[in-house]
Image (cartoon, coloured by chain):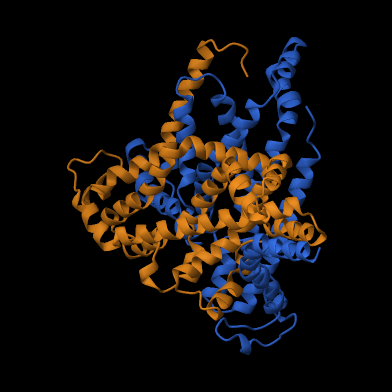
Chain colours: A orange, B blue
Amino acid sequence: MERKANYSVPTLLLEIAAILLGLIFLSPFYFVLSNSVKTLGEILLNAAKWPSTYHWDNYKKVWEQLDFPHVFMNSLLITAFSVAGIVFISSMMAYRLVRRPTVFNKILFTALVASMIIPFQSVMLQLVRITSLLELRGHMYGIIVCYFGFGLALSMFLFHGFIKSVPLEVEEAAVVDGCTPYGVYFKIVFPLLTPIMVTVIILNTLWIWNDYLLPVLVIGGNKDLTTIPLGITKFFGAYTKKWDLALPGLAIGIAPIIVFFLFLQKYIVEGITAGSVKG
Amino acid sequence: MKNKKLSEWMQQFVFVGPGLLFFVIVVFIPFLLGFYYSFTDWNGLDMNKAHWTGLHNLHLIASDTNFWHSLGFTLKFTVVTVIGANVLAFLLAMVLSRPLKTRSILRTVFFLPNVIGGILLGFIWQFIFTKGFTTIGDLTNLPFFNLPWLGTPTTGFWGIVIVFIWQTAGYMMVIYIAALAGLPKDLTEAARIDGANSFQLLWSVIVPLIMPAITICLFLTTSNAFKMFDLNLSLTKGGPGTSTQSLAFNVYAEALNNNRYGLGTMKAMLFFFAVSLITVTQVWFTKRREVEA
């Protein structure tokens, strides 16, 4: 925007204002973290103060009551398998729809794009029925299959836009060299999709990891499959006024995804930018 | 020739089949069934005992004040948050496109609320509103912090607005920053040389050029705000009473708390039409303002 990158007084003032706003943005995390190691009495007395003594015991209790390692593993497995499946089925479909634009495939593409507007609430009740009929409810593979279906449209759309720009010549050369159609896809095209794949993986990971309603409906009462959002909700419901337990629960609930973000933030921001510009 | 045809069918089956199968089971069939169930008295338990009741559910909805209230709430919420989140996001993007020393840290900070799910954000803010704000209020005597946050319909509304904007602005900021980075330098410089002031530069050059980004951001915020559910559930549970119940929440509550799946489905289908109407209109409207650089 600026012609020269010289650091002027207005820039300094803007910087100070932006930092102050940034601190306000971060303040909720301060409240959660600082109060998570206080006694209930101290929280009620003054929630803004830095803790006088650190009660790490709060975390220990919560860790055990939530059965955190188990809940974390559920979230991790569901997210990992769902995202991996979405990447495969949506990229394969997008490839076929780009390379063979038959009437059927064109209609299918339009229908999938249009389906993105359907709110989850409009299908959830019937979905509960169907997942019961097909005996998908209460099983981990059941919820993963549901994520395949819901993640398909957007991911396919992103791959579709990207594949259109992949030159056909490379594929033709491979065919001449004796590659099968499946070999062309898995050996040549699939590796070329890496940039948009990063976007698809990130968008789906953030969504599935944080999702609440679908696990409630499909995992339902099966306690063995509780994910982090479900576990925290139940925990929070049981301890609404016991902030000394609810807050450490929230802190360990948000920790994994924050760590994920901080490590991969460059890719996440790029992925979101790419996804939105193409979307 | 026959082999070629067979191979084409096989490829269509292998590449398109799996995705199509899951999509049909999870989205397509449930969506079609929705049109049927919305005209029944389905109680959610037995599919066979769902009696066709014609337009009865529409009559029920017409006199359902909660439903209309939640529609009003959702529309008001959408307008306020779409404007609020996008104005804030655009300002942040403008500031963070300048050569600030801390800009990469600040971009991370503003984006951070986005990676945490709506459910957990709502719980965090429940604590901030009920305990954090009262403490700050006691220390500073500022009336803003002493309001009964989440305790009345009005403060509850604004409470959810604050959290939603806090969560969404950073995401939109990322998109606006990308758009601003892609602005052709020669055009903005030409406008400066022609004597455009900052406001003219912004309104007549920058905004038209980044209109595609504005379309996307408005679309994303509109559809997210209109479909808001998680945040609503964990922050206020729609309360006090049902005063802060979003439309998505109302659909959920009708079916799962009242066990009226037929009625809930009808509401869900109306919800679908409302979402489509609003987002399509908005995209059509902003698309018309896009220009080529």
Query: Where is A114 relative to B29, above or below?
Result: above
Q: How far across and how far down the image is residue B87, in percent?
A: 62, 35
Q: Is residue B238 visible?
A: yes
The residue under the point 59% across, 51% down is: A186
The image quadrant that residue B175 belongs to is top right
The residue under the point 77% across, 61% down is: B4
The image quadrant that residue A173 belongs to is top right
Is B26 positioned to the left or the right of A37 in the image? right
Front position in the image: A23 or A73:
A73
The residue under the point 70% across, 55% down is: A96
Q: How far across and how far down the image is residue A11, in percent?
A: 52, 16
| Quadrant where the image shows the N terminus of chain A | top right
Front position in the image: A189 or A254:
A189
Q: Is residue B67 visible?
A: no
Query: Where is A13 relative to A113, above or below?
Result: above
The residue under the point 74% across, 18% down is: B187
Is B49 positioned to the left or the right of B111 in the image? right
Q: How far across and how far down the image is residue A236, in percent?
A: 35, 60
